[in-house]
Image: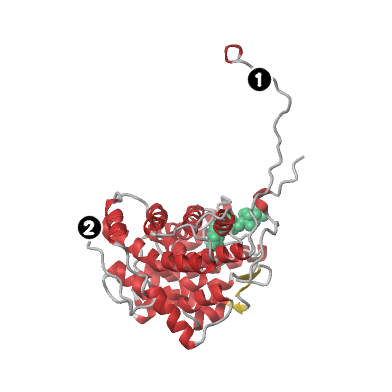
Amino acid sequence: MSTAAKGLEGVVAAETEMSFIDGEKGVLEYVGIAIDPLARHSTFEETVFLLWNKRLPKADELAAFSKDLRSNYGLSKETKRLIALMPTSAQPMHVLRTIVSSLALDDPDPNSTDRSAVQAKGLRILAQAPAIVAAFDRHRRGLEIIEPDSSLSFAANFLWLLNGEKPTDTMERAFDACMILHADHGLNASTFACRVIISTLSDIYSAITGAIGALRGPLHGGANEGVMVALNEVGSVGEVEDFVMGKLKRKERIMGFGHRVYKAYDPRATYLKTLAKQLAEDTGNAELYEKSSRVEQIMEREVAAKGIYPNVDFYSATTYHSIGLKLDLFTPMFALSRIAGWTGHALEQLDANRLIRPKADYVGPHDKPYVSMDKR
Ligand code: ACO
């Protein structure tokens, strides 16, 4: 009988000082600070500094960090050419994975595992990822690529690159909060993939490329798109009851609810719900928010006793839709933010590296003869 823990559930495979999760109480902290005040009062740039340096920055440190990040926003001529070569039918997550991988090609020292070099490369990948997603989206819409604006925050710059318009304050704030909420989350599948790759002393480009591949799966970062698909299936607020009850009777999942770790309200969803409401009202999507809210009420009545509550994906969907993002850009948004967490974990792994190399229980036969081809 194999002793393997299926899905490595319950296995502790690393130490981290970045995020702490208590799933029973619904707690998530970054470096000891609860996620809710961070989402309300911090910025994504400050949060990245916090995750990488394990402390909040002073004003001049944040200014220097932001300047460094923003000076890396622009894509090289070669990267823009490569994006222009992508088939317009390609899926944005595949494009992001491909182009992030290609960023190693013009790095004169791509393989360095020196701490400051890895952090600088992670910063460059983080800074350019929004431009990659936006440039590909414009390419497939037949529009010119827009140059980044280094006077803008990470969040505002992305929306500028995508739409060619400066976002409203509410939109920038909501998008920035989404970036904060998705930045890190313990040893999830993509973060583990990142740590495995960097533990071989491979390069940060490979580690983040692999992590993007892991994030894409519908059991991981792909769920936020599923929420929107479901909300689109419901014609009106009045139809929500039948929709949800029908799914529950058929034992189908309601996307955006439940979590392997949280058995209480996902602490990332609390503030996001407020933002989603405000943004939906501002952008003429009030009915979408009403539908979401009705789904939550019915789920509360029916399944909260089982520990099933909205997760971060549920109100991300309303938020991203209200911002005007196409459905297949929802998962790339998760990736843009999580590059911060992946880079932080790569740095932690390198700080105390040991090759990650678990074992497999062999459950096949032994002592079988080699049978020559003519006798098989
Ligand atoms: N809708 C309806 N019922 C649900 C849901 C849901 N979303 N999630 C769990 N349940 C029910 C199950 O049917 C099961 O009921 P039962 O005991 O009567 O059979 C019970 O809750 C426990 O479910 P498990 O599958 O054992 O819980 P697990 O921890 O394995 O699942 C998961 C977690 C995969 C996230 C699940 O809740 C799910 O599929 N949710 C929908 C997809 C989703 O939103 N994923 C995003 C997660 S957050 C993130 O990745 C950022």
Q: Do the residues labelled 2 and 1 touch (CB within 8 Å)?
A: no
- Residue sitting nearer the eye, 228 or 75: 75
Ligand 1 quadrant assignment: bottom right
Left or right: 262 with respect to 46? right
**Quadrant location, the N terminus:** top right
> Can I make out residue 194 in this image?
yes
Q: Which amino acid does label 1 sit on?
A: Tyr
Q: Farthest residue to the front: give it.
A: 108
Instruction: Report crowding for label 1: few under 14, some 14 to 19, many 20 or more residues within 10 A (C-alpha).
Output: few
> Residue 236: percent from the left, percent from the top?
40, 64
> Residue 300: percent from the left, percent from the top?
59, 68
Q: Name the residue under label 2.
A: 142
Foreground label between 2 and 1 = 1
Q: Farthest residue to the right: give it.
A: 1
Of the numbered discs in the image, which one, if any, rests on residue 217?
none
Instruction: Report crowding for label 2: few under 14, some 14 to 19, many 20 or more residues within 10 A (C-alpha).
Output: few
Q: Name the residue under label 1.
A: 370
Does 169 sit above or below residue 318? below
> Residue 252: percent from the left, percent from the top?
55, 52
Snapshot colouring: secondary structure
